Image (cartoon, helix red, strand yellow):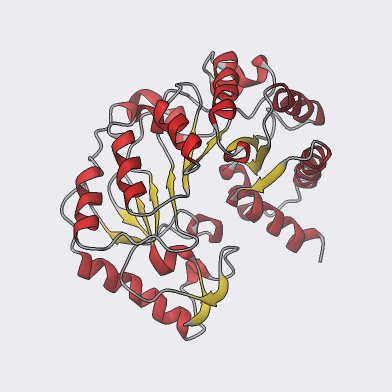
Amino acid sequence: MRYKSCDWISGGLDFRQNSIVLCCFTYMQGYDEYELVSNYFGERINWEELFKRKRELTELQKKGQSAKFCQNCVYLEERDWYDDDTINCLIFNHWTKCNSACIYCEFGKEQEYYGKIPYYDIVPILEDMEVNGILKAVPGSFVSFGGGEPAILKNFGKIIKIVERNGFKNIRVNSSGIKYSEAIAQGLDKGIINVCISPDAGSKEKYLQIKRTDAFKKVWENIGKYVKSSNDKLNVKIKYIIIPGYNDTKEDVDDFFMQINNYHVKSVCISVEKNWAMNLKINTYCDKREKRIYELMDYFKCCAEHQDLELEIYSEGLAFEKYIKEKYLK
């Protein structure tokens, strides 16, 4: 049936540390996450109840309405959607341990605390979905690993095998790049994984300021290894998050693209720091930095085009661009 919806409303699940939510984008609209299962720590899932919650949102979309947290979302799209009770998009955010200490990440800010939080094993849950015919790969299906760090996640390779044998061929792994992963390299070779590494810097000094981990050389060397092992070079995506006050100059961007060229990367991603972008909507004063960051995003795009690179704009970047256009460019 044709109506306006998105992959997450139609068939998505986002596994969190203590809940299962619809998606990870409701913050862009200023709303808390929509929980499908609360107080969740790996127990057997009541699929009937979960899909009942999802159907409530689907029915709204069919009527031309939307839940408040979905209204005007950049991911809404009008097309034919699947109406069965299956899952065709997954994101794993159920663990918090990481090997980096990024200044913009809550896990990095409180690394000692989050590094000790226990997490549930996702494998039995996926096997239960498999047995019950709930996992269903369709055109456009994808799986995404959020964070903590996937390369140090228990059973990471087994998770990849389960989703692969259920037909999922588009698996996004967001990684710090600090630990080289054979599972990622093998998936790149098969063409079923695309890895997104976010060094956010092209110099050792800026990397150390942002990541607070002395791993600049190791990360870029691992990026080079992944590029070499990849069947499709576009599947190694290198991300630059603009963090105002840290890496927000053209010189910083130039340094980044120098590394991109040195390690033969063919695909880049751009975004802006989430908390800073969210606070723009709260503050009523005019921040001149807003326009400068917007212009820096344009400069980044021009650099990517000049090097003939594939460019992806992450959700925070899309939301920021939408905000600037609505505020200044009407």
**Image coordinates for residue 125, horizontal then vertical, percent:** 22, 50
- At 32% from the left and 66% from the top, the residue drawn is 86
* Residue 264 visible somewhere in the drawing: yes
Left or right of residue 257: residue 99 = left
Q: Residue furthest left?
A: 44
**Image coordinates for residue 76, horizontal then vertical, percent:** 56, 68
The correct choice, above or below, for 104 with respect to 66 in the image is above
- At 56% from the left and 43% from the top, the residue drawn is 275
- At 59% from the left and 14% from the top, the residue drawn is 217
Q: Which of 87/295 is in front? A: 87
Left or right of residue 264: residue 219 = left
Q: Which quarter of the figure is the C terminus placed in?
A: bottom right
The correct choice, above or below, for 225 with respect to 77 in the image is above
Q: Residue furthest bottom?
A: 63
Left or right of residue 43: residue 148 = right
* Residue 174 visible somewhere in the drawing: no
Q: Which of 74/103 is in front? A: 74
- At 80% from the left and 42% from the top, the residue drawn is 305
The correct choice, above or below, for 250 with respect to 15 in the image is above
**Image coordinates for residue 135, horizontal then vertical, percent:** 31, 59
The correct choice, above or below, for 59 with respect to 104 in the image is below
All told, the count of numbered labels is 0
